Amino acid sequence: MSKFWSPIVSRLTPYTPGEQPKLSKLIKLNTNENPYGPSPLALAAIAAEAGDSLRLYPDPEADVLKRALAEQNAAHGITSAHVFVGNGSDEVLAHAFQALLQHEEPILFPDISYSFYPTYCGLYEVAHRTVPLAADFSLRVDDYLGVDAGGIIFPNPNAPTGCLLPLAEVERLVAGQPDCVVIVDEAYVDFGGDSAIPLVARYPNLLVVQTLSKSRSLAGLRVGFAIGHPDLITALNRVKNSFNSYPLDRMAIAGATAAIKDQAHFDKTRHAVMASREHMVAGLTELGFEVLPSAANFVFARHPRHDAAKLAASLRGDGIIVRHFSSARIAQFLRITVGTDEACQALLDALQLHLQALPADF
């Protein structure tokens, strides 16, 4: 702590990102990156932009990317006026907290969800209340209805559990809270869920946030977007243009636009991840793990006889990194990114050896 800090800084609990190890030759299954590479069309577009044009500022509105996203969703009544883009979905969410969630009533989100939400609340002084998930880690829509709220936000599929709220239930929540903004954080929706984007034209209080980091394999490029009623998008743009008018560089705009247009690569890689997920789930179940149903590119699993933190440490000794959370309710779970089939099998082989060698903890 320093005497030069603003008071809010000393009160903050910053978000802890997943480890990005500096060592090579690791099997990295801790930050939900896509094991397959980006679209070749995206890589070509990025390379083409890496020339003399970099001396020029990018388009502050990223209109070409917005048009690509609008065209992809035109069947649902989406136009460029419904689209906002930012430097990763985390920036989009941060702007949404500032632009749409600062009200007298506290906002609501699940007790087990994306851990950046309480960080944003602390940074932007947004009052909040967490709503417990059910015993099976499902979100109960009725818990969010009939209560005053300054806004509602939740990931779907949820993170870190991977559990999916069916689209009909998402709509019931949005329709049941017409006087507050409902933000559906769909970072992982392309791996098994139905997006809420088709609902946007009917519900002016709905904002859907997505990222190109996961299903489009562009985590290193930092591109996210939101789709919602133009009034919500205007609010986001007012915050963006008061903070950073140029959130996306020229290479990000070009690469993201090409990735959105490459439907064949998108379908091929996401279906490969989904197939590997089922292989991993079957293997973990055979080893005695309880695995929550996942519609994401990761699984959330616990073993009834072995401590999760110890298992994570043992795997690390084998050069395999998974994510462990210390929060009491999920302290015995491991979140495991779905890698290639080879990476998934290496994980299962290592776990089998450790389960045989380690004494039971419970």
Image: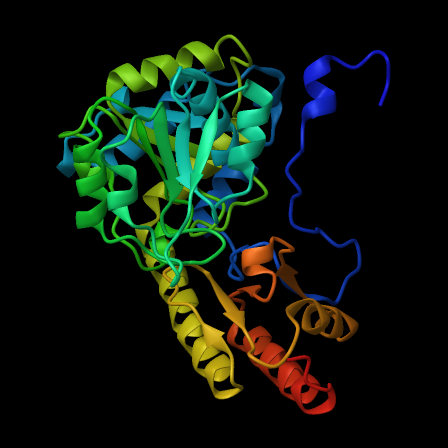
Q: Is residue 107 above or below residue 190?
A: above
From the viewer's perspective, tell me whether residue 94 is left or right of residue 76: right
| Residue 281 image position (x, y, % from top left) | 45, 76
Q: Quadrant of residue 144?
A: top left
Does residue 222 appear in this view? no
- Residue drawn at x 48%, y 88% as measured from the top left: 286
| Front-most of residues 350 and 121 | 121
| Residue 152 image position (x, y, % from top left) | 35, 32
From the viewer's perspective, tell me whether residue 40 is left or right of residue 357: left
- Residue drawn at x 40%, y 58% as measured from the top left: 137
| Residue 296 image position (x, y, % from top left) | 41, 58
Does residue 322 appear in this view? yes
From the viewer's perspective, tell me whether residue 316 is left or right of residue 111: right
| Residue 169 image position (x, y, % from top left) | 21, 48
From the viewer's perspective, tell me whether residue 192 is left or right of residue 277: left
Quadrant of image for the N terminus: top right
Q: Quadrant of residue 268?
A: bottom left
| Front-most of residues 64 and 132 | 132
- Residue drawn at x 79%, y 53% as measured from the top left: 22
- How is this picture coloured? rainbow
Q: Is residue 86 above or below residue 290?
A: above
